Image: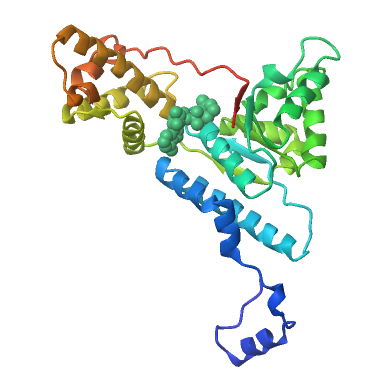
Amino acid sequence: MTTLPPPHTEKQNEVVNATPDTSQEDNVDVSSVLEESQVLDVLQKLDEELVGLTAVKTRIREIASLLVVDRLRRSLALTTRPPSLHMSFTGPPGTGKTTVAMRMATILHRLGYVRRGHLVAVTRDDLVGQYIGHTAPKTKEILKRAMGGVLFIDEAYYLYRQENERDYGQEVIEVLLQVMENQREDIVVILAGYKDRMNTFFQSNPGVSSRIAHHLDFPDYTIDELLAIAQIMLAEQMYQFSPEAWEAFEAYLNRRMQMPRFSNGRSVRNAIDRARLRQANRLIAKGGKLSKADLMTIEAEDILASRVFTEGVPENEEKPPGPEETS
Ligand SMILES: Nc1ncnc2c1ncn2[C@@H]1O[C@H](COP(=O)(O)OP(=O)(O)OP(=O)(O)O)[C@@H](O)[C@H]1O
Ligand SMILES: [Mg+2]
């Protein structure tokens, strides 16, 4: 460990004076890069629109800073290979991994790290072929689509089957490794999934693990965070809960969280979608004149009619199928 001299000492002044003279032309302007790339807008939106995730947000700011500095350095011909930015996003379902990956793609694009800034989200089935010789071309095709952006592999551990050496997933991993190493200027690979399974996957695939520069962990949300997420979703859709509906919704979440296949933000979104259906039914049944407030407000009864209360079982919550492409 090195000890830094205390600030404002003679010694430190000596050190400062000893640094090479930097002429005016050698100066770069941080604010110009920030303005031109509008990256601060994206970071601010990330802060405002995403509840919680403090550690994830901090890491994203650090990565953004690194890329800004990298750009400034390059503008002064301090060229190095761009930093490796492959990542792993670990956490339970619905904790914002895909959402953050999309924001990340935008940030990488604005800071000139990737050309297009789109996100291609896939799972094992999109990469693995059914017959010998089909896997590599299939994987390469997906990689081609993802070039210039982010390739997001959900439940990445399914690519590796310990019990089957000849599993085609192995071929996917080999192709991926090459691209992660050789084409990292033009593609960022994000591997996502449950934390414990990803850890096992990384242990069995040290080659992959060593190419991952950033591990971001997405924890389960607290009930307060889930309520805050509901508030954001309602506002986005121009709906509101009545005070009684908020109470009902909190009770709903407390029950739903204990049931199988609870998936954080996605469960909140699905619950709101269903409440909207019931509200619409209620309004039509009521008939007559409806006010703007009627059209906006979800009442407690729209929530309490859920199967979570009536039958004690969750409604079906399927994840949308992949591959998805978003820009
Ligand atoms: N922190 C958050 N703030 C606001 N909304 C959020 C937050 N986290 C998740 N959501 C919302 O919850 C839903 C699910 O999020 P997302 O699809 O990003 O989760 P995920 O971690 O990718 O889930 P899975 O592992 O099941 O794919 C989305 O509608 C997203 O907008
Ligand atoms: Mg996802």
Query: Which residue lies most toward the left here?
Result: 288
Residue 94 horizontal/vertical position (percent): 47, 28
Residue 70 x %, y %: 69, 58
Image position of 49 (left or right of 218): left
Residue 316 visible, this angle: yes
The extreme bottom residue here reads 10
Q: List the single residue furthest toward the right.
A: 133
Q: Residue placed at 61% from the left, 67% from the top?
A: 29
Quadrant location of ligand 2?
top right
Determine whether, in the image, residue 72 is placed left or right of residue 99: right
Q: Nearer the viewer, residue 97 or 280?
A: 280
Q: How is the image coloured?
A: rainbow
Residue at (58% x, 55% y) in the render? 36
Looking at the image, how many numbered discs can be counted on the residues? 0
Residue 91 appears in the picture as rendered: no
Q: Which residue is depicted at the point 37% across and 14% down?
A: 314
* In the image, residue 305 above or below residue 218: above
Where's the C terminus, which quadrant? top right
Asked where in the image residue 27 lies, by quadrant, the reply is: bottom right
Q: Percent from the top left, x then y, of residue 122?
A: 64, 24
Q: Is residue 145 depicted above or below 289 in this figure?
A: below
Residue placed at 73% from the left, 34% from the top? Answer: 147
The spot of residue 299 in percent (x, y) is 19, 22
Q: Quadrant of residue 186?
A: top right
Q: Quadrant of the N terminus?
A: bottom right
Front one among 284 and 241:
284
Q: Is residue 297 left or right of residue 222?
A: left
Furthest toward the top, the residue is: 285
